[in-house]
Image (cartoon, grey):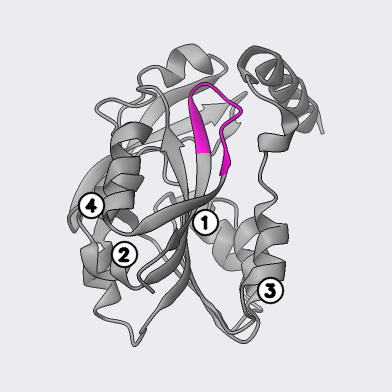
Amino acid sequence: MIQDKFRVAYFTQLYKECYISSVDRMLDIKGWIQHTLPKNGIVVEAGTADGNDTVWFANHFSEGKVYGFEPYENYYHMSRAKTAQYPNVEIAPFALDARTGKRQFYLSDMNGGDWGSSSLLKPKEHLEVHPAITFKNVAEVQTINLDEWFQTKDIDTVTLLWLDIQGSEPDVLMNSPTILKRTKYLYTEVSLIETYENVVLWDEFRAFLEASGFQIIGEELPWRDMGNILLRNTRL
């Protein structure tokens, strides 16, 4: 309860410091999914974090399949436990990356508890924008190239590719052209400043996605550091 109150206070302050646009720029992504995407859709989610979104996907796409990725051990086990009753969910303990292998993973925490800002990229301006979130520990994690994973699955088309991997989204997609071509909708986190070292910023990422045939159909960019974009593949 104390931690929950701390998080509410933190986000209240964050809202005051970082909110730079009107409320109508916030995207009701789950409402859009409910009204647009079929129950038998295929979802690829990275990372699953605590598994709450994964459970929501499992319920909505009850006739389809949800594939999740979560490299942080605590969150991986939490996600597995929450989705154990869902036969349409499969979660792998990997971090999506440009290449398959092993990488250092910078673990985030706030007020002594796990936090969803962990990344393969070393934090930079994140430390200034979110001083309450720290990165005290580093873990070695297994990484996987998304195209290599895709080739092992009997999947023709991905209905929704959901990426929330703290700056690694461009690296993953720029090195996985096959699955990108076979993805109908992409919902991805984007970086507006160098929150993490050497992160590909939104302008460059946007140019790549548009050149790959993706069109923006929704956005939420109310913060000055990061945001989320919904895109449609115009070639499918």
Q: CA distance from mark 3 to mark 1?
A: 16 Å
Q: Residue 224: within the magenta?
A: yes
Query: Which residue is disc 3 drawn over?
Result: 60
Q: Work out how far the residue at label 3 is from the one at label 2, CA to CA, in angstroms.
A: 23 Å
Q: Of marks 1 and 2, which one's residue comes earlier in the chain?
A: 1
Where residue 53 appears, x then y in whole percent?
A: 63, 58
Residue 196: give x, y in percent of width and height: 34, 27
**Mark 1 — residue?**
48
- The mark lying in front, picked from 3 and 1, is 3
Q: Quadrant for the N terminus, please.
A: top right
x and y, in percent, of residue 40 in the image: 58, 84
Q: How far apart in space, not on screen, are marks 3 and 4 (Cα)?
A: 29 Å
Q: Which residue is mark 2?
A: 180
Q: Which residues are magenta?
A: 219-227
Q: Earlier in the sequence, mark 1 or mark 4?
A: 1
Q: Nearer the viewer, residue 52 or 226?
A: 226
Among the two numbered marks 3 and 1 on one chain, the one whose residue lies closer to the N terminus:
1
- In the rendered view, would you say 185 is above or below 113? below
Q: Which mark is residue 174?
A: 4
Q: Amino acid at mark 3?
A: His
Q: CA distance from mark 2 to mark 4?
A: 9 Å
Sequence-first tag of 2 and 4: 4
Mark before the other along the chain sequence, 3 or 4: 3
Residue 140 in view here: no
Disc with the residue nearer the chain's start (3 vs 2): 3
| Image quadrant assignment for residue 5 | top right
The amino acid at mark 2 is Leu
Looking at the rendered structure, the secondary structure element under dot 4 is helix
Instruction: Count numbered badges in the picture.
Output: 4
